[in-house]
Image (tube, rainbow, N blue to C red):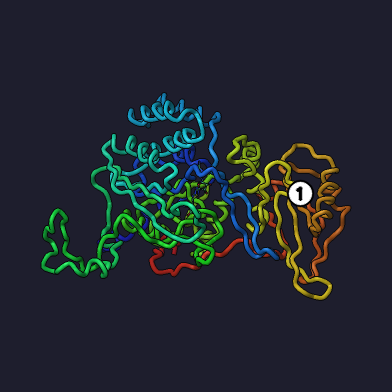
Amino acid sequence: MFRLFIKQKHTFQRMEQKNKLYYGDNLEVLRKNVKDETVDLCYIDPPFNSKRNYNQIYNNIGKEDVAQAQAFVDTWTWNSIATEGLEEITSNKNGVFTKQSIFLVIGLEKVLGKGSLLAYLVSMTQRIAEIYRVLKPTGSFYLHCDPTASHYLKLVLDAIFCSQGGDFRNEIIWAYSGGGRPNDDFARKHDIILRYSKGEKVTFNADAVRIPYNLDTEKYKSPKSWGSHNGSEKIYAPHDLGKIPEDWWPISPINSQSKERLGYPTQKPEALLERIIKASSNEGDVILDAYCGCGTTIAVAQKLNRHWIGIDITYQSISLIMKRLEDSFGKSILEKNCFTISGIPEDFESAIALANKQDDRVRKEFEKWIILTFSNNRAVINDKKGSDGGIDGTAFVIDFNEKQEQILEQAIFSVKSSKTLAPTVIRDLFGTMERENAVIGYLLTLYDMPNLVKEATKYGNYQNKMFGHSYPKIEVINVQHILDGKKMYLPTVDVLKKANRKTPEGLSKDMFGN
Ligand SMILES: C[S@@+](CC[C@H](N)C(=O)[O-])C[C@H]1O[C@@H](n2cnc3c(N)ncnc32)[C@H](O)[C@@H]1O
């Protein structure tokens, strides 16, 4: 009877702390949705100020077998967002900034001036202050960065954590090899993970992460000397389960041959996150990744029976994470209420708000959302800045040619958010289809466009020889159709790589609701 009561209480706690995926800017999401002292472990892998734009790699789409679209931008400029951020910090908005972090940012402004690096550091200071707020007193924070800005970020972290009773615990070096190498320099082959604790007492599960001793160097220490002092160096007795890893981690990165590879730029290996999550959290704890990319932290947290909160500002990441979770844990994870998604347009007003966002970082987010939702992730986003030749996305249709050989035809997507559109838009789309040799054209509109629907019917049908179906050559679909669940109904190739199925061991039943 007593045991039954304990179990029920446990299940209730789990249901209360639902897993959450947020589409949006993490600063806004943290401020609005994540309460003080509710997170056990936060890992972030933010853009490093690399001045690069990162591209998603797509597969299975013809001769070159690869296409790219911009996944996220890591180029920072001093703009109105940076000015607003600096003002928030120096005026200590909401009282979340420590005196040390305010003085640090004022000092950095003097040293660096108002440019790209300061814009980056202002953005990080705002967000790290929020992360500190949401961590539990026993919580841990891991900030993944590289030598471009790690020295500045450590100052920011010290100013936020150490000035409030937190502690700097480790500078972890993630060491790897492979990839390109310069001819005239040492190859830069490590990232830096700065580990901080919010308070003195912190979760650290040594036994969960032990690794074998290195017999080449460690076996020579005479058993008699273990546990004693050898000069200034203390030599510890060997532990039956192995040693706690050093602060340098030789873990293979994701390369073109990796089984885990999803084609997402900057994807981190699951082994890295497994070590962090196992060391610094327990089953049922809440893990936050506020820059979750293709969802490595989330997939590992789910596998290890932790609760999770993921945030990303681009729709490509959000849709990729949903696919990763489905491929890894089965459809039930989407169906059985295992997590909630917030920030994706659910009604016409929020779709209008997304279409009207002015922020350059989220340029094209409306196009990405509408194309990926309608195509069920089976389209490649065209991210060219400025003129896109009328094409915002492409899907690849499977068909037969005259000789009954399998070929791929193109379906193209054009997105328009204007309130009024003339029928010439349809003619232009048809012109683009002819130029690109595309068999289908989808015009995705924000508003209902009966005049264009009528115009589109003039262009007849495309006949798919492989499946014996015919489809309208041009279709006009509006946001309301998509909100009502309308999907592209075409035989197309899967342009994204599938995540490996995770074994069910380690998955708690109540997380799946059965
Ligand atoms: C380096 S990637 C993270 C990769 C991730 N660790 C993985 O293994 O897939 C950084 C991510 O941060 C996201 N991002 C950048 N600024 C953001 C912001 N202000 N709020 C939320 N996400 C942001 C980008 O869209 C990108 O997906």
The picture quadrant where one finds residue 471 is bottom right
Looking at the picture, tell me which residue is in the foreground, 69 or 304.
69
Q: Is residue 250 visible?
A: yes
Q: Quadrant of the C terminus?
A: bottom left
Q: Quadrant of the N terminus?
A: bottom left
Whether 31 is drawn above or below 17: the answer is above
Outermost residue on the right side: it is 458
Q: Residue at image x 73%, y 43%?
A: 387
Q: Is residue 241 left or right of residue 66?
A: left
Q: Is residue 323 left or right of residue 149?
A: right
Looking at the picture, tell me which residue is in the foreground, 124 or 377.
124
Name the secondary structure under disc 1. strand
Q: Is residue 331 visible?
A: no
For badge 1, the amino acid type reads Leu
Residue matched to label 1: 443
Residue 450 placed where, x, y %?
Answer: 81, 44
Residue 470 placed where, x, y %?
Answer: 81, 64
Residue 107 placed where, x, y %?
Answer: 39, 27
